[in-house]
Amino acid sequence: MTVNLSEAWRGALGCAAVAATLLAAACGGSSEPTTHFHASRIVAFGDESSLLVDSGDHNARKFSVNATVSDTDQTIVCALNPLWIQGVGNIYGLVFPECNNGTPPVFAPVSRIRAAFGARAADLGTQIDAQQAESPLGAGDLVTVMVGANDVLALYAQYPAQSEDQLVATAEAAGAETGRQVNRLTDLGAKVLLSTIFNMGVTPFGASERAAHADTDRAALLTHISSRYNALLRATIVNDGRKIGLVLMDEFVTDVSTIPGAGGFTNFTDPVCDLTKSQLTPPSSLDCTAQTFVSGGSAVFLWADNLHLSATGQSSLASLAISRAQNNPF
């Protein structure tokens, strides 16, 4: 099988992973793990950044850049261009049921995705409840959590009817709620890889909102709301590194958007997916592939669409998370 990932694409993914690992080490990770935790299963909580959408063939699509068999065969290959949760699963030899079409497929994979499209902080508790009802979490389980971007977007949509101070206060409450649910996960015995949300002000959506409104710097408003959500999330979790591996995706994205060439990205402002080529209603990056890129689009774009990471962006997030999984004293 010939896969349509070019050598340049493979190289960009690899460079992004290396750069993310170096940034993770600079954020306080130890060079040697004090324990050798090995996950027996992975359970993914959060929003669509951790979601594999399976149409029934166990060959799911992603809100990112989807790999295909070749330039002429548009069949999706879900194991390639993996989401960050898949990247973490790969180091433990674990797959999710939604992407399980290998030869042969894994029999009865135990990992689960509870993440859902549009999920917010208030949904995290329900997702945990669903997992507990099916198969309670405990020692040996590694869970991933990334949620809050949709909270920021929902709050931003209330501006200017709601003041910036009101929006920030609500964002802080949402961040604290996520933190409480993460603490609940650790109380259940699971180890947690928790990612901060990226700065929504530096997304293509943030840039378009800045250009469309003259009343205030809308990108700066999105940044403020995002940063306060993250601040209360971090202030609420009980974290000595032994239960929670904190993945600072907000800092990574900010570095990429402010430091030329950081992470190997040369375009951090534009979506790589041309959604006018989407066959879905509404148009979505779920059917974005290398064949539906914008002119000049490549692996060095950070964003798939206005709000979601490209395959290389997901690879960077995976590398940060893997560094925490391997270096934290779990």
Image: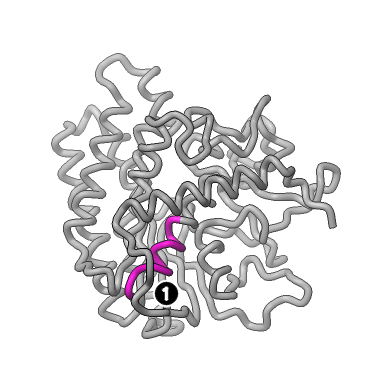
> Residue sitting at 72 percent across and 66 percent down?
57
- The residue lying toward the viewer, choosing from 160 and 193, is 193
Quarter location, residue 246: bottom left
Q: Total of numbered circles in the picture? A: 1
Q: Is residue 238 left or right of residue 269?
A: left
x and y percentages locating residue 27 in the rendered image: 31, 53
Decide if residue 147 is in sight here.
no
Rendering quarter of residue 169: top left
Q: Position of residue 285 (x, y in %)?
A: 59, 42
Q: Give the residue type that dot 1 points to.
A: Leu
Q: Is residue 157 one of those drawn in magenta?
A: no
Which residue was labeled with disc 1?
Answer: 142
At 55% across and 32% down in the image, what residue appears? Answer: 271
Q: State which region is magenta.
A: 320-330
> Is 214 on the left or on the right of 294, as rendered?
left
Q: Quadrant of the N terminus?
A: bottom right
Disc 1, SS:
strand
Task: Write the residue at 72% across / 76% down.
Answer: 105
Q: Main secondary structure of the magenta part?
A: helix
Quadrant of the rendering where the C terminus is positioned: bottom left
Position of residue 164 relative to residue 104, above or below, is above
Q: Nearer the viewer, residue 315 or 68?
A: 315
Q: Residue 155 appears at what percent x and percent y?
A: 28, 40
